[in-house]
């Protein structure tokens, strides 16, 4: 359940084709790069894109999240990009999402006028009426991706010289394209690359011209002028005029707003963070299968200029519990059922489950390094695939069975696949819980008896027993309850130091942020002194400027050198854990601080540099947003209790009774 993903891909007992090689990247400050947290994120549930503040689509993979990139400037300046904006102006006046949508609006002010660009990956009505989709496995909705990236331009005042440069470079920047017109006019062109089946169509009311692999347009827009450009790759036909483009953009906006309206969000100043996180998680969900993708990118560095760069465009079993909790908590039951069904499809009939799978259910995720790409800010290597799929990690059974338990409680239904899954996976946890493993962080040093792995084995057996009891399998329930108690007794005998604090592994004195999960999975009651001491020890001793580290690198043999950023998911876990032990004021202050670190569009990467506030790692990061939802809802619930159960009396409201610190001073 940790946001470990491929964090230790090179340290997982599995390696990429070039693992073991030493990468000497240029320091990040030698290369100008758009800050990771400043990108805008677009999605249609099948394809995602990152748009820079300067109006350039720097990352997009087609036709799936995990396909080779067609725009890859994020990882190499010659790997393709698609810019729309004014000539000679690189910094916009404002970038925002249209409220409640995944439509990005960039406003540009120039000495001569203003233009507004809106970007969307179009979603339209379901169109598979006469045939069945070849990719959808979940129950169809009333809508689906149109496979079109639409960019509209409006001149709001004055006049602005405007450019459009579209240069796809296929296969992660390895194959240049050749453009050709589709008819007698300048308004549509198609491109492809040698040896690829992918065809991209560019349609516009701008006159298109070609310079090598780049399609371009130049025009002077005057007040009231509107234009569009659409890049499509099969699916719905592209718009042929601005009126059609605008109509479909509005349909997409209304789709996102209607979807968001299904959710249940508290009336609170932090509501926008919850809504943006919900939209981001929906955008990271691969609609045909229901899989939640860990992130939309590969190889964004966790250490600038360093080698901690991995492919997160896959789905991890350990994400399941938090994903289902967040989706059910916010009222998105259909999405929760779809993700649970994706997982059930994968593990039904399997004894040996993997920690991660492809978003289409693929089991083999071979990792390869792309030497031709310099990486974000010269941070090599660039990796595709993820060697972690072959690792054995003992927390996977607990993550799976906790999600089964949560689904059963919320949906009050288990289909006929689930009991055999439950029986097999409890048996696997009982078979292996006494053995050491690589731990939740996938360290590549010697295997240890990691305490968090033992706790998750306990979770597996405990949840199995609870489900058995709820379904009338009393014999199994009694057997598993005894086994769960045996695991708990072993942890309490070996996983604590002399202070009564849970440690990273048996016999160690090191702290580990994964132990913040102990109160969240109800290993012990939140008022147990051992839980309280552990949470406060991590808060006091495993933080830098209040932000939580996974562990101290000088105490853990993780196979890497140097400092790493704080793990944002761990910091949000700390907020939730502080709420659990009743430390409301401390939890709220930390939560407010973490929310202040959000990118300008309220998006988060995997890590935050505690010294600079810079976002690090793949982006946007699903599990960071899942942990945010958990933390914020924890704080809001505790706020209501602090204010006499009145949910409208949110902490910090201007009522003369705002929060105070321990001394009584206002926060």
Image (cartoon, grey):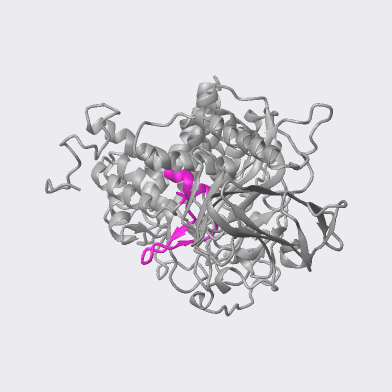
Where in the figure is residue 423, as x and y percent of width and height? 61, 33
Q: Is residue 273 magenta?
A: no
Tag count: 0
- In the picture, residue 381 is in which quadrant? bottom right
Nearest to the observer: residue 549 or residue 493: 549
- Above or below, 170 against 317 in this view is below
- Above or below, 343 against 293 in this view is above
In this view of the protein, can residue 106 be seen by the observer? yes
Please indicate whether residue 501 sits to the left or right of residue 420 in the image. left
In this view of the protein, can residue 405 be seen by the observer? no
Where in the figure is residue 156, as x and y percent of width and height? 53, 48
Please indicate whether residue 8 sits to the left or right of residue 206 in the image. left
Please indicate whether residue 215 sits to the left or right of residue 221 in the image. right
Q: What residue is rendered at 65% in x and 35% in y?
A: 247
Where in the figure is residue 59, as x and y percent of width and height? 63, 58
- In the picture, residue 429 is in which quadrant? top right
Please indicate whether residue 172 sits to the left or right of residue 599 in the image. right
Q: What residue is rendered at 79% in x and 34% in y?
A: 133
- Above or below, 629 against 568 in this view is above
Q: What residue is rendered at 46% in x and 59% in y?
A: 607
Nearest to the observer: residue 362 or residue 79: 79
Q: Which residues are magenta?
A: 601-628
Q: Is residue 624 magenta?
A: yes
Prevalent SS, magenta region: loop
Where in the figure is residue 256, as x and y percent of width and height? 57, 35
């Amino acid at each position: 359940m940790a946001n470990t993903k491929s964090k230790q891909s090179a340290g997982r007992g599995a390696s990429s084709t070039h693992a073991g090689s030493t990468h000497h990247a240029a320091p990040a400050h030698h290369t100008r790069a758009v800050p990771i947290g400043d990108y805008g994120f677009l999605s249609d549930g099948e394809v995602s894109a990152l748009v820079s503040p300067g109006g350039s689509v720097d990352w997009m993979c087609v036709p799936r999240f995990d396909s080779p990139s067609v725009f890859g400037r994020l990882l190499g300046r010659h790997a393709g990009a698609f810019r729309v904006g004014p000539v000679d102006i690189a910094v916009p006046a404002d970038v925002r999402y249209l409220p409640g949508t995944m439509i990005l609006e960039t406003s540009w002010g120039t000495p001569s006028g203003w233009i507004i660009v809106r970007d969307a990956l179009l979603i339209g009505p379901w169109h598979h009426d006469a045939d069945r989709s070849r990719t959808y496995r979940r129950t169809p909705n009333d809508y689906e991706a149109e496979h079109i990236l639409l960019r509209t331009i409006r001149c709001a005042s004055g006049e602005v010289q405007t450019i459009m440069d579209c240069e796809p470079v296929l296969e992660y920047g390895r194959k240049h394209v050749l453009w050709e017109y589709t008819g007698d006019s300048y308004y549509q062109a198609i491109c492809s690359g040698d040896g690829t089946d992918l065809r991209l169509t560019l349609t516009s009311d701008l006159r298109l011209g070609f310079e090598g692999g780049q399609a371009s347009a130049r025009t002077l827009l005057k007040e009231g002028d509107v234009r569009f450009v659409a890049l499509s790759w099969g699916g719905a036909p592209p718009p042929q005029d601005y009126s059609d483009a605008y109509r479909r953009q509005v349909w997409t906006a209304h789709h996102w707003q209607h979807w968001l309206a299904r959710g249940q969000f508290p009336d609170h100043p932090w509501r926008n963070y919850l809504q943006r996180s919900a939209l981001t998680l929906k955008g990271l969900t691969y609609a045909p299968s229901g899989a939640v993708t860990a992130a939309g990118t590969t190889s964004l560095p966790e250490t600038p200029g360093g080698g901690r760069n991995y492919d997160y465009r896959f789905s991890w079993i350990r994400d399941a519990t938090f994903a289902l909790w967040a989706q059910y908590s916010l009222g998105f039951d259909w999405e929760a059922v779809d993700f649970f069904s994706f997982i059930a499809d994968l593990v039904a009939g399997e004894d040996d489950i993997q920690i991660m799978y492809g978003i289409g259910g693929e089991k083999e995720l071979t990792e390869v390094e792309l030497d031709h790409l310099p990486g974000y800010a010269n941070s090599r290597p660039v990796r595709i695939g993820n060697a972690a799929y072959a690792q054995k990690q003992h927390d996977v059974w607990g993550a799976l069975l906790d999600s089964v338990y949560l689904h059963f409680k919320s949906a009050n239904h288990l289909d006929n696949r689930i009991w055999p899954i439950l029986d097999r996976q409890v048996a696997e946890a009982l078979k292996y819980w006494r053995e050491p493993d690589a731990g939740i962080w996938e360290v590549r040093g010697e295997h240890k008896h990691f305490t968090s792995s033992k706790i998750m084995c306990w979770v597996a057996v405990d949840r199995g027993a609870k489900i058995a009891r709820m379904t009338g399998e009393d014999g199994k329930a009694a057997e598993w309850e005894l086994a769960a108690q045996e695991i708990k007794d072993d942890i309490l005998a070996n996983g604590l130091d002399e202070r009564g604090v849970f440690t990273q592994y048996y016999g160690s004195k090191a702290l580990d942020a994964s132990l913040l999960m102990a109160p969240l999975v109800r290993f012990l009651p939140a008022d147990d002194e051992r839980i309280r001491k552990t949470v406060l020890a991590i808060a006091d001793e495993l933080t830098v400027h209040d932000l939580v580290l996974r562990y101290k690198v000088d105490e853990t043999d993780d196979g890497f050198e140097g400092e790493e950023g704080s793990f944002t998911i761990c910091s949000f876990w700390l907020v939730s854990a502080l709420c659990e032990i009743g430390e409301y004021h401390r939890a709220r202050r930390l939560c407010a601080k973490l929310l202040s670190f959000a990118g300008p569009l309220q998006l988060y990467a995997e890590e935050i540099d505690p010294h600079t506030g810079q976002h690090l790692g793949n982006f946007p990061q699903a599990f960071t947003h899942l942990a945010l939802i958990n933390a914020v809802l924890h704080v809001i619930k505790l706020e209501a209790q602090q204010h006499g159960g009145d949910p409208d009396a949110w902490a910090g409201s201007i009522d003369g009774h705002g929060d105070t610190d321990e001394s009584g001073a206002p926060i």
